[in-house]
Image (tube, rainbow, N blue to C red):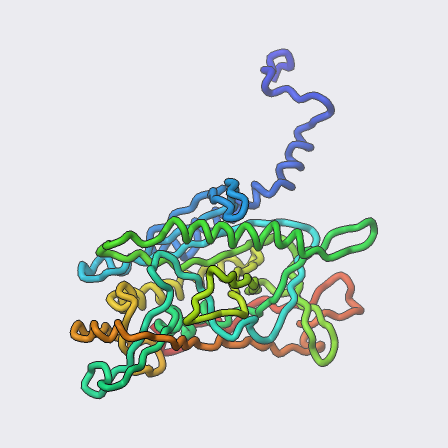
Amino acid sequence: MVENATPPFAQLFSGVTVGKIRDVISKSGYPFQAVIAEVFRESSLRDAGQLEIQEEWAYVDRESGETRSVDLFVNTVFRHGYEHPESKIRASLSLVVECKQSELPYIFFLRHSPPTSRSTFPEFGGLNSTDIRVFPEGELGGIRQNEDFSIWMSVSDALALHELPFFNAPAPYAISLAKAVRRGAKLELTGEEAYRGITLPLLKAADHLHSLIQPQPNSVLVFPKIIVNLAVVRAPMVGTFLHAGEQELMALPWVRVGHLEPTLPDQLDRQRARITGNVRYFDVVHESFLPRYLEVLARDATSAAERLHLHSTEIAAGVAMSDFSEGHEGLKPLPENHDLDLEKPCHMHIGRSPNALSISVTKTGGEISDSESSAVVGWIDGYPWLDRPSGDD
């Protein structure tokens, strides 16, 4: 190339070089975002249904009213239901995704048990209510007579999604997340950076998504959406937990983080009060584990969509009857001649307790960090219990 022929728009000044531009682009995170988008395009989600991926998905901040964006919005519309004209359900899966890279680690404060006594994962959108009113089934297949009794159950519990590994206890729980930062020669932890960089964008974007998919009045079809909030990181992921009376460190590729939101007085349902607050979840996954994560998600979300389709009448109506046997098979539509039962009040809400996940580790097994090996964190690199149990959908 002749120097004099270089056009003005290709010339660099003030000490800027091609190498410096490449370096600042690499640190910006945009190339990493593009890499992760490509992983989604090649993932098992494309076989589960119609896959759509949008980068820089815009949402409106619920507090400030400002327009912001998350790195990726991934939507899969499942094929279930379209081949059955009588189905009232058109289910889909949406992932709200943030991509972060750092040489310094993210620190997860792990617990052996979930941060709430009720299962609140996954989030469901596109429904008039995420609860179903369930009546007990009698011996003749109808509602038990002379018994003023019904309960509220979440859609997740009614469909027994805990039977599917991804929605049960697939990874360790963390009650909080922090980021290591340098302060001179020392490392310090900041929860604020992780909160503003991961937690807030994910949950606020999910709130915006919920507002966009409110069901239309008098619509014949219902469009339930399974919503998963996800951070994909290219950074060390280190969990800290109490083991045998000592604070231990262990690196791991997938953590499910709980975030407690307060219940405000004007949001309180007096019949089903939750004064302890509402726990919402997001997953943090290392990029090396993302293909496996998406494989399990696609498999189990497909099974969840099948259950939504199977019980489309109950989900669309928000009422059902059940023999309360284990699993979802006992859920049935409410007989038409029992509409009057809906006029009776229902104050009882029954929720299934989420499973706890306890990881057995030993210093000799190499999972827990050894203080004598300062450059390597002890780790686990997979979760064998993610394989589908026998007898599932």
Residue beneath the point at 46% across and 61% down: 267
Front position in the image: 343 or 80: 343
Front position in the image: 148 or 53: 148
Where's residue 269, x and y in %? 43, 66
Picture quadrant of residue 329: bottom left
Where's residue 306, x and y in %? 31, 66
Residue beneath the point at 56% across and 52% down: 200
Above or below 329: residue 120: above
Residue 234 vs residue 132: left or right? right
- The residue at the far top in this view is 4
Residue beneath the point at 45% across and 48% down: 73
Front position in the image: 324 or 303: 324
Residue 205 vs residue 182: left or right? left
Residue beneath the point at 64% across and 64% down: 108
Front position in the image: 183 or 333: 333
Whether residue 248 is visible to the viewer of this picture, yes or no, is yes
**Considering the image in quadrants, where does the C terminus appear?**
bottom left
- The residue at the far right in this view is 185
Above or below 219: residue 257: below
Where's residue 246, x and y in %? 74, 76
Whether residue 34 is visible to the viewer of this picture, yes or no, is no
Residue 322 vs residue 286: left or right? left
Q: How many marks?
A: 0
- The residue at the far bottom in this view is 139
Above or below 227: residue 366: below
- The residue at the far left in this view is 337
Picture quadrant of residue 91: bottom left
